[in-house]
Image: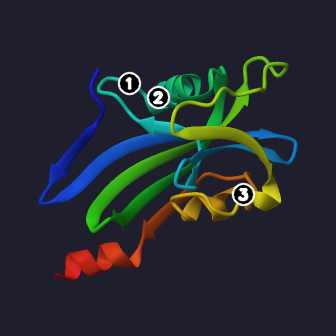
Amino acid sequence: MQDIRTKIAGVSVDIRACGLLRNGDDYLVSTENDGTQTLHGGAIKVGETTEDAVVREFFEETALQVIPNRLLALIENHFCIDNQPYQQLLFVYDVHLSDPTKRDPKSEDGCTSQWLPKEQVTQLRPAILNELVHQPFSTFTHIINQEPAFIDYLAR
C-alpha cells in the first residue's frame, strides 16, 4: 500500500507514527548518517492504523517486535527542511518489546539504532520530541509545534 503523503498548495503533508521504546532509563534511538536522531517510525500507509504502522516500521527498521502500550502524544508538526514546508500529524506511542530478551536492534543502510541513556536523548527531530521524552508519561499530550521557518513561509 501507498504511504499517506501529498502536497497541498506547495506544502508537503503526511501522517506518521513513531514509538518510544524504553528499557529502564535507556531509549532506542535511530541516528541517520547526517547525525539526525529520531524515534523509530514512519509514514502511515493507506488503510493502516497508526498502531499497525508503528509495529511495522519498528520491525522494518530494527527487526524488533514491539507492542504499543498506549498513545502518548499527537504532535501537529509544522516545519521546513531545505526551504520545503511540511505539515505533519505525528502519533507517538509508548511501546514495549514483545520478547524482552530480544533487545538488540539491527541497523539499516543510512541509520544506526542504539540504546541511549535518557540524559543523552537531546537531539531528536522534530525537536519537540526531546521535551516529550523528558516529561512524565502519565497523560496523553496534544502538542502544536510550529517552527519559525514554517511561520515565515506562511507569511510570504
Query: Is residue 19 at all visible to an observer of this figure?
Result: no
Answer with left or right where residue 121 lies relative to residue 68: right
Q: Residue at x 51, y 59 (%)?
A: 126
Crowding around mark 3 (Cα neighbors within 10 Å: few <14, some 14 to 19, many 20+) is: many
Quarter of the image holding residue 79?
A: bottom left
Answer with left or right where residue 150 lies relative to residue 117: left
Residue at image mark 1: 48
Instruction: Name the residue nearer the viewer: 134 or 109.
Output: 109
The percent position of residue 103, horizontal first and vertical second, equals 78, 26
Label 2: which secondary element: helix
Q: Residue at x 42, y 42 (%)?
A: 16
Quarter of the image holding residue 23?
A: top right
> Distance from label 3 to label 2 (Cα)?
23 Å
> Distance from label 3 to label 1 (Cα)?
29 Å
Label 3: which secondary element: loop
Q: Quadrant of the N terminus?
A: top left
Question: Amino acid under label 1?
Answer: Glu
Q: Residue at x 39, y 50 (%)?
A: 89
Q: Earlier in the sequence, mark 3 or mark 1?
A: 1
Tell which tag, 3 or 1, sits nearer the viewer. 3
The percent position of residue 118, horizontal first and vertical second, equals 80, 55
Q: Earlier in the sequence, mark 2 or mark 1?
A: 1
Q: Earlier in the sequence, mark 3 or mark 2?
A: 2
Say whether marks 2 and 1 touch (CB < 8 Å).
yes
Question: Amino acid under label 2?
Answer: Ala
Q: Which numbered disc covers residue 53? A: 2
Residue at image mark 3: 121
Question: Amino acid under label 3?
Answer: Val
The percent position of residue 111, horizontal first and vertical second, equals 56, 40
Instruction: Name the residue nearer the viewer: 110 or 103.
Output: 110
Crowding around mark 2 (Cα neighbors within 10 Å: few <14, some 14 to 19, many 20+) is: many
